[in-house]
Amino acid sequence: MKKIVIFYCLTFLLLLQACSQQQKIERGKVYNHLTLNNDTSLSYAIYVPVNTVRKDSLVFIFFDPHGSGELPVNMYKNLADKYGITLIGNNNSANGTDFNTISSNFSTLLNELKSSYSIAEKNIALWGFSGGSKAAIYNAGLNNNIAYCIYGGSVMSAQNKNIELLGFNGKQDMNYTDLLTFASQQQNNPKHFQIASNGKHAWPDTVTAEDAFRWLLLKKMQKKEMPLDRIFAAKCFAYFKKQTDKLIQSNQLTDAYQTCNKSIHFLQKLIATNYFTKQKDSISGKSLFKKQVQELQSTFVKESQLKTQYQTNFFSMDTLYWKKEIEQLWSASKSDPTGIYNRLLGFLSLAGYSYASQAFQANDIKALEQILFIYQHSDPANPEQAYMRAKLYALKNEKEKAKTALDESIKLGIDKNRIANDILLKNL
């Protein structure tokens, strides 16, 4: 790890000299909202790590589905310090914005970042979550000099086939099986790897996300874009070995098998990976492993059937049916290691949001009452369902109920700017 630190540390003064006078950046401090000099309607968040800064440091640029670039920057700042990678959050990429606009905004952002901080495109990795994943992949595909991209929660095919692509796929995520399908389509692509975790539809937690930091450094070493650090590679090997051994001991053989695959993908060409190859061969011959694979396949079939059933029943069954069904899903999710019931709750939440958006456009009050009942009960911690219920009550002229739901949405974290700009709710 010391070699990486030395490799990255010329001096922090070099970075400051490269910055514009208007944007003087201190290392170790998060800036959530810096406006661009060339376009003040655009902004970004940034964190320059404390200990390993140099003129051409590695950089993650984040694409959040809600345009909250500061969210992943604040989440991963400690990892940035540990691995010496600068974090930048794009605040102008959000769901509902067309790709051409997102791409144009990102091009403006990228040009200013390169001039302000002397960032080289070859040292940039784009990282997106959910709709932000598609935005990241789309922009990486348009720029042949950006060769690294990370996705999670959603995915699309990259236009640039030379991109090194890393995916995070949460077992509790409603899009889990869709991302598995994408991974199977990429099985012959040596530049792609997908990591399964226990996460929900959210940015990966810091323990899971740390693999992205390892991945970028190890990939740069594999491609001889930075010197091989044998000590760092050995530490990664030891961590992956401990991870594999723990999973085998707890009989989580499918996860152990995938960890071996990850270890080989990350460490190949840098250090001997015979240990992981032998463990894969051993695991694949075990009857318990074969049984677990069959159980997973059965789970996926069951999930697909239930999704089809729920789509059929969404409007045909009454709220008593949905209350009972959703309560059963919540109960089953508490002791379910496969994640199927949390994924089904997420599926109902996503369907609720989609159907409600359409019903608002059609001003269909009756449909909204059914949809938002399902949405609220399947995803009560989501501020969007409370916000939509406030709008429904406002349409029905039930002001006190609208205020209560609006207050709930604020407590759950809704963007208050949306309320201020909403013709139905701003006066409440």
Image (cartoon, grey):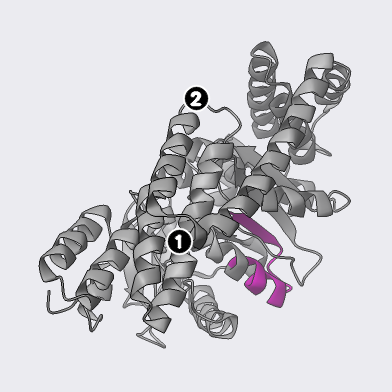
Quadrant of image for the C terminus: bottom left
Task: Determine if residue 8 is in view.
Answer: yes
Q: Which residue is mark 1?
A: 352
Alpha carbon distance from label 1 to label 2: 25 Å
The residue under the point 59% across, 62% down is 133
Q: How many marks?
A: 2
Q: Quadrant of residue 15?
A: bottom left
Question: Of all residues shown, which one is farthest toward the top?
Answer: 249
Q: Disc 2 marks which amino acid?
A: Ser
Q: Secondary structure at mark 2?
A: loop
Relative to 373, is 80 above or below? above
Q: Do the numbered discs 1 and 2 sit on residues whose CB atoms are within 8 Å?
A: no
Residue position for label 2: 335
Q: Position of residue 278 (x, y in %)?
A: 87, 20
- At x 65% / y 43%, what residue is drawn? 303
Task: Classify mark 1: helix, strand or loop.
Answer: helix
Whether the magenta-drawn stretch holds residue 406 is answered as no
Judged by depth in the image, the label closer to the viewer, 1 or 2, is 1
- At 72% from the left edge and 32% from the top edge, which residue is drawn? 296
Q: Amino acid at mark 1?
A: Gly
Q: Quadrant of the N terminus?
A: top right
Task: Please determine whether, in this image, residue 222 is positioned above or below residue 264.
Answer: below
In the drawing, does residue 99 fall left or right of residue 19?
right
Residue 363 on image: x %, y %: 36, 81
- Which residue is depicted at the point 34% across and 60% down? 385
- 363 left or right, relative to 253: left
